[in-house]
Amino acid sequence: MKQRTNFRTRLLSEFSDVAAGALDAPAAILTVAESSGEMIIATTGLDLPPDGSGSPTLPSFHSELLLGTEPVLVPDARASVPRQHIEGASFEIRAWLGVPIVRRRRGIRAALSVFSAEPRHWSDDDVALGKELAAAAVEHLDLESALAAAESALRARDDTIRLISHDLRNPLNAIQLTAALLLESGEERRHETVERLELIRRVAMQMNDLIQDLLDASVMDTGEFNVERLDASAARLVEQACELLAPIAETRNIRLAWRTAQVARPIHLDERQMLRVFSNVIGNAIKFT
């Protein structure tokens, strides 16, 4: 977060420098206040003292500019009331041009102030240029925010794919091993064959749920899973997870046994997600035993 804020401040500083150069002014302040409450401040030719939070202390007239909608033109600060003063300025302010920018739809406000050490008549071209530069700074910050949001969405998508790919391994292994056991069983073991076919059916349903999560665009973008809470038996979910992983345990010469307490009252939970949790916990226990 701090790194991103520093990048945005440097980006705004470039526009502040350009504004001061384009308007032939020795100093400038460019401020953007976003709807989130974050305020980014950049200065050129000024060394504003920090406030209690460490941010530069804005002159009161520049802070007021953020709340306005019309440009402020001061050709001679000595003749203005009240007198404009900036703590940290190395020269006397003799002229000041302030330009506010409002983006109501996005809840963004920006203000550009440029200062002159000599009295100056600010032209319409100066005002128009100031508006264009302040607006361009806001647009660039918007693009940077959109890029950061897109990168965050991509990271969430990658994390989701990795998570579901990991969760698919246990069901796939169970299907492969159960199918192999079925091929080895004869007619005299028909009862076991039916049980294993039922296991394959349940595992296939679990895999279908995982694949649906993988294909769900909203899950991919937010990095979150939909939770559907219902009254269910946690003991039964543990049994299902153990039945699913028993063939895998057998290949490692591990006998998987389980005992669950009978809870009279059902628990309010998401069966599908909790089955994944139990399967991962038991699967890791088998893997690292």
Image: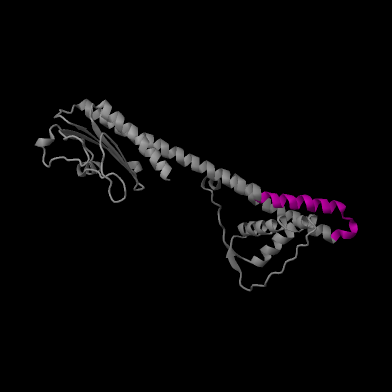
Total tally of numbered discs in the picture: 0
Q: Where is residue 145, by image quadrant?
A: top left
Above or below for 61 versus 25: below
Left or right: 254, with 166 as reference point:
right
Q: Nearer the viewer, residue 280 or 41?
A: 41
Left or right: 235, with 140 as reference point:
right
Residue located at (51% from left, 43% from top): 153
Left or right: 258, with 53 as reference point:
right
Above or below for 21 versus 152: above
Quadrant where the C terminus lies? bottom right
Identify the colour scheme used.
Answer: one colour
Give the residues drawn in magenta, as a range: 167-190
Q: Main structural element of the magenta stretch: helix, strand or loop?
A: helix
Q: Position of residue 66 (x, y in %)?
A: 25, 42
Can I make out residue 171 in this image?
yes
Residue located at (12% from left, 33% from top): 76
Residue located at (18% from left, 28% from top): 122
Can I make out residue 102 in this image?
no
Whether residue 224 is in magenta: the answer is: no
Q: Position of residue 115 (x, y in %)?
A: 20, 33
Q: Residue furthest front?
A: 90
Q: Where is residue 119, by image quadrant?
A: top left
Quadrant where the N terminus lies? top left
Left or right: 233, with 95 as reference point:
right
Q: Position of residue 2 (x, y in %)?
A: 41, 45
Q: Position of residue 232 (x, y in %)?
A: 62, 65
Whether residue 171 is in magenta: the answer is: yes
